[in-house]
């Protein structure tokens, strides 16, 4: 019924004309002023082999000198190095983060080269999601580190993409806006460059790599963007050197045979890149990052955590309900685990008890056995004692008899001489 009421109201919507100036036409200005005071952030990821000209291009793009140090060719693994700078142009503040994939393409085994890059991008998404899920969110002054664009530096071989390039771009294309660029384009001749561009694009298409397309749905930029889409990948030249051409100082690279002017459109696509990346589509890159790549990450992550928008009967399912079911599920599982643990404990106790009983029985038996042995021994000793006593008694008896006999015979011998004397007297 509520929906029906809403629809009815919508149908009743009428156009009215205003009697005078009210002022809500200043809303866009209010938005601009708010955004300007808040400042902007833009995060660029540079992926390309060591020494391909990443730092030089960044310096050229932003017309400044960022701190840079050369990477060594002996990194054990690819490492992501973010650096944040505060830039200001007229009254607009830009918090620019440049992330370098240090050591990319330098390992002998490059199977896992893409992984640190993917992990880095995911970590930035995760940080943002965590901030969103907080009870006290501060997204307003949160330093958004999500990567808005990945400049993929292609080595100017003139042949084709390397498998490392294809694998890496394929792994990244659902996570970040990829703009492929041919680096050091001054090292490749004009006709070769044309073929090289076609080759790269066809390889990207046949491998299903989705690169960033400049948007053509906004009338104001549709024309320039569709023209520029046909120029991809941009072939760029970077330089921090300034050379005098005519009576103007321009950024260029000077060679014995001539000068390559960075900002000369017939020399390279640098201006096109700057135009597309910074002057026309920076906001679209930021928006795509939020509405496409981050949204995908968020959806997968929440689904992984078990959140759903609809229940099995495709009825709307609120976050609260999902949370409740998950909580119940979890509690049930916890109870089951607890019961299992308890049972295990009881079993263990029983086992130990019976083991102890068995031990006791053994000990008792041992004791009984020892007791029997002891009694036997005692009995034997008793017998021996009795035997010895008997022997002693017999001996004593014999001794007594002998003694009586002795004393009798002694008496007899002492009476005989008396008789003789009597006889003599007679
Ligand atoms: P690491 O950070 O060490 O990986 O290097 P990098 O990719 O930042 O390269 P860097 O900008 O330090 O440039 C390496 C070398 O390439 C320097 O000698 C640059 O002058 C040179 N270089 C940079 N851009 C270009 C270019 O467009 N064309 C040519 N020919 N050389 C370039
Ligand atoms: Mg560098």
Image (cartoon, grey):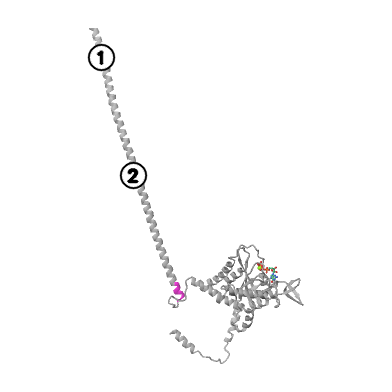
Tell me which secondary structure the magenta stretch mostly adopts.
Answer: helix
Q: Name the residue under label 1.
A: 415
Badge 2 density bin: few <14, some 14–19, many ≥20, Cα 10 Å = few
Q: Does the magenta stretch include residue 318?
A: yes
- Quadrant of the rendering where the N terminus is positioned: bottom left
Q: Is residue 136 visible?
A: no
Q: Residue at x 25, y 10 (%)?
A: 420
Q: Which residue is drawn at 53% across and 74% down?
A: 296
Classify mark 2: helix, strand or loop: helix
Instruction: Please state the extent of the stretch shown in magenta in the rendering.
Output: 317-323
Q: Can residue 383 be seen in this view?
A: yes
- Quadrant of the rendering where the C terminus is positioned: top left
In the rendered view, does 106 fall on the left or right side of 300? right
Residue 29 in which image quadrant: bottom right
Q: Does the residue labelled 1 lie within 8 Å of ligand 1?
A: no
Q: In this view, does 402 lie above or below 328?
A: above
Q: Does the magenta stretch include residue 282?
A: no
Q: Is residue 250 above or below residue 16?
A: above
In the rendered view, does 46 fall on the left or right side of 362? right
Quadrant location, ligand no. 1: bottom right
Q: Which residue is drawn at 36% across and 50% down?
A: 358
Structural distance between the alpha carbons of marks 1 and 2: 70 Å
Q: Could you say where residue 364 lies in the image, as x and y percent from the top left?
A: 35, 47
Q: Could you say where residue 73 lies in the image, as x and y percent from the top left?
A: 65, 63
Q: Which residue is drawn at 42% across and 66% down?
A: 333
Label located before the other in sequence (1 or 2): 2
Label 1 or label 2, whichever lies nearer to me, is 2
Q: Mark 2 points at which residue?
A: 368
């Amino acid at each position: 019924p509520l929906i029906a009421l809403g629809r009815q109201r919508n149908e009743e919507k009428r156009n009215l004309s205003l009697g005078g100036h009210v002022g809500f036409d200043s809303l866009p200005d209010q938005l601009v002023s708010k955004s300007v005071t808040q400042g902007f952030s833009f995060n660029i990821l540079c992926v390309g082999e060591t020494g391909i000209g990443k730092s030089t291009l960044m310096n050229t793009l932003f017309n400044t000198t960022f701190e840079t140090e050369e990477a060594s060719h002996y990194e054990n693994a690819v490492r992501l190095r973010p650096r944040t700078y505060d830039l200001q142009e007229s009254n607009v503040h830009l918090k620019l983060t440049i992330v370098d994939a240090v050591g990319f393409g330098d390992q002998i085994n490059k199977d896992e080269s893409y992984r640190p890059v993917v992990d880095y991008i995911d970590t930035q998404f995760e940080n943002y999601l965590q901030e969103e899920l907080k009870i006290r969110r501060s997204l307003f002054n949160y330093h958004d580190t999500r990567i808005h664009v990945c400049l993929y530096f292609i080595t100017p071989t003139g042949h084709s993409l390397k498998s490392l390039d294809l694998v890496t771009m394929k792994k990244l294309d659902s996570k970040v806006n990829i703009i492929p660029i041919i680096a050091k384009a001054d090292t490749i001749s004009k006709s070769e460059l044309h073929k090289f561009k076609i080759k790269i694009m066809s390889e990207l298409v046949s491998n299903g790599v989705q690169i960033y397309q400049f948007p053509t749905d906004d009338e104001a930029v549709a024309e320039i963007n569709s023209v520029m889409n046909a120029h991809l990948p941009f072939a760029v030249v970077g330089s921090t050197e300034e050379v005098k051409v005519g009576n103007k100082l321009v950024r260029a690279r000077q060679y014995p045979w001539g000068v390559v002017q960075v900002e000369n459109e017939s020399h390279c696509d640098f201006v096109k890149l700057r135009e597309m990346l910074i002057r026309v589509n920076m906001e679209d890159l930021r928006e795509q990052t939020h509405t496409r790549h981050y949204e995908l990450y968020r959806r997968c992550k929440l689904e992984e955590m078990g959140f759903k928008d609809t229940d099995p009967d495709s009825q709307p399912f609120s976050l609260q309900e999902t949370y409740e079911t998950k909580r119940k599920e979890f509690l049930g599982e916890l109870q089951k685990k607890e019961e299992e643990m308890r049972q295990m404990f009881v079993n263990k106790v029983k086992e130990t008890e019976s083991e102890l009983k068995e031990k006791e029985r053994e000990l008792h038996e041992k004791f009984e056995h020892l007791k029997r042995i002891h009694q036997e021994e005692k009995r034997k000793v008793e017998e021996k004692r009795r035997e010895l006593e008997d022997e002693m008694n017999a001996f004593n008896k014999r001794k007594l008899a002998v003694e009586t006999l002795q004393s009798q015979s002694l008496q007899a011998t002492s009476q005989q001489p008396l008789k003789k004397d009597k006889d003599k007297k007679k």
